[in-house]
């Protein structure tokens, strides 16, 4: 099987509020609004927002999740300065900053924010990871 992701969909409590968060705070544009689901085309895959009770029903599991969801999503940037500038923008927009950018033991630089339903996003600079002009990870092969 190929190592890739086509869709990454999260279940949300308030679809319209979450759509507005990603549009207003992250500056993302929707791909198109489907009936009851929101899609954002990212670099090579689609990030989806779907009502959590409907997503649980679609999967066939109970809708009883709460607390820490045990995952985070990450976007890498090209410099520590770019991370700092993004966090200044987030701060000005009232985004909840969980951890301000800081140097980390492995040599990188990162911070965390949360959306309005406490999904965690890491924004980082990794000096060991090469990105192309579009922000895609370059192969190390």
Image (tube, rainbow, N blue to C red):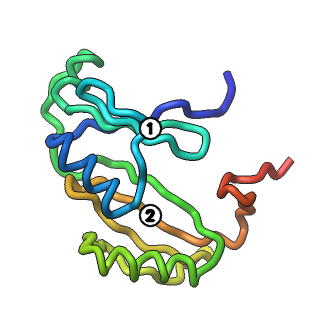
Q: Nearer the viewer, residue 113 or 17?
A: 17
Residue marked by disc 2? 122
Other residues around mark 2 within 10 Å, as few (<14) / some (14–19) / many (≥20):
some
> Residue 95 vs residue 133: left or right?
left
Quarter where residue 129 is shown: bottom right
Q: Nearer the viewer, residue 97 or 60?
A: 97
Alpha carbon distance from label 2 to label 1: 23 Å
For the point 44% across and 63% down, which residue is it? 122
Secondary structure found at label 2: strand
Q: Is residue 68 above or below residue 45?
A: below
Residue 101 drawn at (x, y percent): 44, 80
Q: Residue furthest right?
A: 141
Indicate which disc residue 85 carries. none
Residue 47 drawn at (x, y percent): 43, 40
For the point 29% across and 30% down, which residue is it? 37
For the point 48% across and 32% down, which residue is it? 7
Residue marked by disc 1? 31
Other residues around mark 1 within 10 Å, as few (<14) / some (14–19) / many (≥20):
some
Q: Which corner quadrant holds the N terminus? A: top right
Secondary structure found at label 1: loop
For the point 60% across and 72% down, which residue is it? 125
Q: Of circles 2 and 1, which is in front?
A: 1
> Residue 137 vs residue 90: left or right?
right
Residue 23 drawn at (x, y percent): 34, 54
Mark 2 or mark 1: name the one nearer the start of the chain: 1
Q: Nearer the viewer, residue 45 or 1?
A: 45
Residue 121 drawn at (x, y percent): 39, 60
């Amino acid at each position: 099987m190929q190592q890739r992701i086509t869709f990454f969909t999260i279940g949300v409590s308030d679809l319209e509020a979450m759509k507005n968060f990603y549009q207003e705070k992250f500056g993302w544009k929707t791909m198109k609004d489907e009936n009851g689901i929101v899609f954002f085309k990212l670099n090579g895959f689609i990030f989806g927002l779907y009502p959590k009770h409907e997503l649980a029903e679609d999967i066939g599991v109970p809708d009883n999740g709460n607390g820490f969801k045990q995952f985070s999503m990450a976007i890498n940037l090209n410099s520590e300065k770019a991370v700092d500038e993004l966090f200044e923008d987030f701060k000005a927009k009232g985004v909840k900053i969980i951890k301000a950018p800081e140097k980390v033991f492995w040599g990188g630089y990162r911070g965390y924010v949360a959306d309005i339903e406490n999904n965690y996003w890491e924004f980082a600079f990794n000096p060991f990871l090469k990105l192309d002009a579009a922000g895609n990870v370059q192969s190390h092969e």
